[in-house]
Amino acid sequence: MNPIDDIDRAIIAATQGGLPLTSSPYEEVANEIGVSGDEVMQRMQRMLENGIIRRIGAVPNHYALGFRGNGMTVWDVDDKRAQEIGRQIGQLDFVSHAYLRPRHAPEWTYNLFAMAHGRDRAEVYAKADIIRALLGEDCRSGDILFSTRILKKTGLRLVS
C-alpha cells in the first residue's frame, strides 16, 4: 500500500465534509487544491483500492426526505446461511444497509442487521414482515430497534 502524500491529504481535507453538490464535484475539488479533475479521480480511486477510503457514496438524510419511522431490524438466522440471506435483504429497495455482526449470547442472539426506512413505524413493521417472510424457516427470531435521535454521520477526518 502506498502511503498518502500532501496531495492525497489535500483531497481528503477538501472532501471530508462531502463532495461539492455541483455537476462536476471532482473538478471543483481539483480547482481548490491546484490539480486536475482527472488526478483527483485517479487518486481517490487508488485510495479506495488501498483501503485508505472505504467508500464514496451518498448519505441521505432520511428524516428530511420524510422517512421518520426508521428502524434497525435485527434477526437471528443460521450462521451458515446468514451471508447469502443478508445479500438478498440488502437488495430490498427499502433497506439502506444490511450487515452481519457477532452474537453475544445469551443477551444478544441476533447476527443479521438491516436498516429499514418508512414514513412511520407502521410502515417499518410492514417492511419487517416482508424481511421475515424472505427469511422463512431460516429466521429463529427478530426485532426492530427504532431510531430515537439523529446521529451526525461523518466521513474520514484528518487530524493535525
Image (cartoon, grey):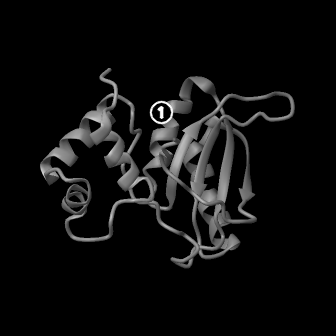
Q: Is residue 160 above or below residue 149?
A: above
48 w.r.t. 24: above or below: above
In which quadrant is the N terminus drawn? top left
Farthest-out residue, top:
1
Residue at 49% of width from left, 50% of height from top? 155
Residue 105: image location, x then y, percent = 82, 27
For the residue marked with disc 1, what is the amino acid? Glu
In the image, is residue 129 above or below residue 22?
A: above
Res 106 → quadrant: top right
Residue 99 lies in quadrant: top right
Q: Total label count?
A: 1
- Residue occupied by mark 1: 84
Q: Position of residue 103 (x, y in %)?
A: 73, 29
Residue 90 in percent (x, y) is at 47, 47
Q: Nearer the viewer, residue 41 or 77?
A: 41
Q: Is residue 159 left or right of residue 45?
A: right
Q: Secondary structure at mark 1?
A: helix
Q: Residue at x 19, y 53 (%)?
A: 34
- Position of 97 compared to 112: left or right? left
Q: Residues within 10 Å of mark 1 (few under 14, many from 20)?
A: few
In percent of width and height, residue 51 lies at 38, 31
Q: Is 131 or 149 nearer to us in this picture?
A: 149
| Residue at 67% in and 65% down | 150
Nearest to the observer: residue 86 or residue 41: 41
